[in-house]
Image (spheres, rainbow, N blue to C red):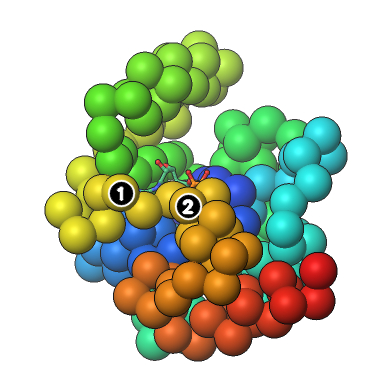
């Protein structure tokens, strides 16, 4: 089976992420959304909350699942027999960092490939942090994140 992993922080998932997931799901037998556990970076949502939000946002796509992982991505992939990393590119500014990371992963595990997918123009400005900035000031985040999770994000800020 041809499985790909789409790794990231997803704090929270946006429509830009979802668009990449939906497109990748048409190419691969299975796509795992990998939520990276980074102990040095405390996000808005806990890892468990991020996983639950993604699960709700992807329930219409049968061949996508969500997992969290810690440690090296290539180790997780080798343990789970995954050979392809999917990355989304928004702008040239994403490229340098992603290029470096894909070469490092290749060095660590030469049989793993990174595939880059270009953002859709309508999501090219979208990031988790910009969504959080808008929501923090009570702005409208409709069309920026999946409808199913809008209330969770607004509640998070109301509770702060
Ligand atoms: P963010 O940069 O929004 O915090 P992540 O670190 O969770 O997102 O990113 C996970 C992956 O999704 C990365 O490959 C990133 O380039 C990609 N990505 C993020 N936002 C978009 C978008 N709007 N369109 C396409 N790809 C995106």
Q: Is mark 2 within 8 Å of ligand 1?
A: yes
Q: Nearer the viewer, residue 26 or 145?
A: 145
Q: Which mark is residue 45?
A: none
Q: Which residue position is annotated with label 1?
A: 125
Residue at 27% from the left image edge and 57% from the top image edge: 123
Q: Earlier in the sequence, mark 1 or mark 2?
A: 1
Q: Is residue 14 above or below residue 37?
A: below
Asked if the residue under mark 2 is in contact with the one under mark 1, i.e. CB atoms within 8 Å, the reply is yes
Residue 158 coordinates in the image, percent (x, y) = 73, 77
User: Looking at the rendering, which quadrant does residue 122 occupy?
Assistant: bottom left
Residue 70 coordinates in the image, percent (x, y) = 75, 42
Q: Is residue 112 above or below residue 50?
A: above
Residue at 48% from the left image edge and 71% from the top image edge: 139
Q: Which residue position is annotated with label 2?
A: 130
Q: Quadrant of the N terminus?
A: bottom left
Residue at 36% from the left image edge and 53% from the top image edge: 126
Q: Nearer the viewer, residue 110 or 147?
A: 147
């Amino acid at each position: 089976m041809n499985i790909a992993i789409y790794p990231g922080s997803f704090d929270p998932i946006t429509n830009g992420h979802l668009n990449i997931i939906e497109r990748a799901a048409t190419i691969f037998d299975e796509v795992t959304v990998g939520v990276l556990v980074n102990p040095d970076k405390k996000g808005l949502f806990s890892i468990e909350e991020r996983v639950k939000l993604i699960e709700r946002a992807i329930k219409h796509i049968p061949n996508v699942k969500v997992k969290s992982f810690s440690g090296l991505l290539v180790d997780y992939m080798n343990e789970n027999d995954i050979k392809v990393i999917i990355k989304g590119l928004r702008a040239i500014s994403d490229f340098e960092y992603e290029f470096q990371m894909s070469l490092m992963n290749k060095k660590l595990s030469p049989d793993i490939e990174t595939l880059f997918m270009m953002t859709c123009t309508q999501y090219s400005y979208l990031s988790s942090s910009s969504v959080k900035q808008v929501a923090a000031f009570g702005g409208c985040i409709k069309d920026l994140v999946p409808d199913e999770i809008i209330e969770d994000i607004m509640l998070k800020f109301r509770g702060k």
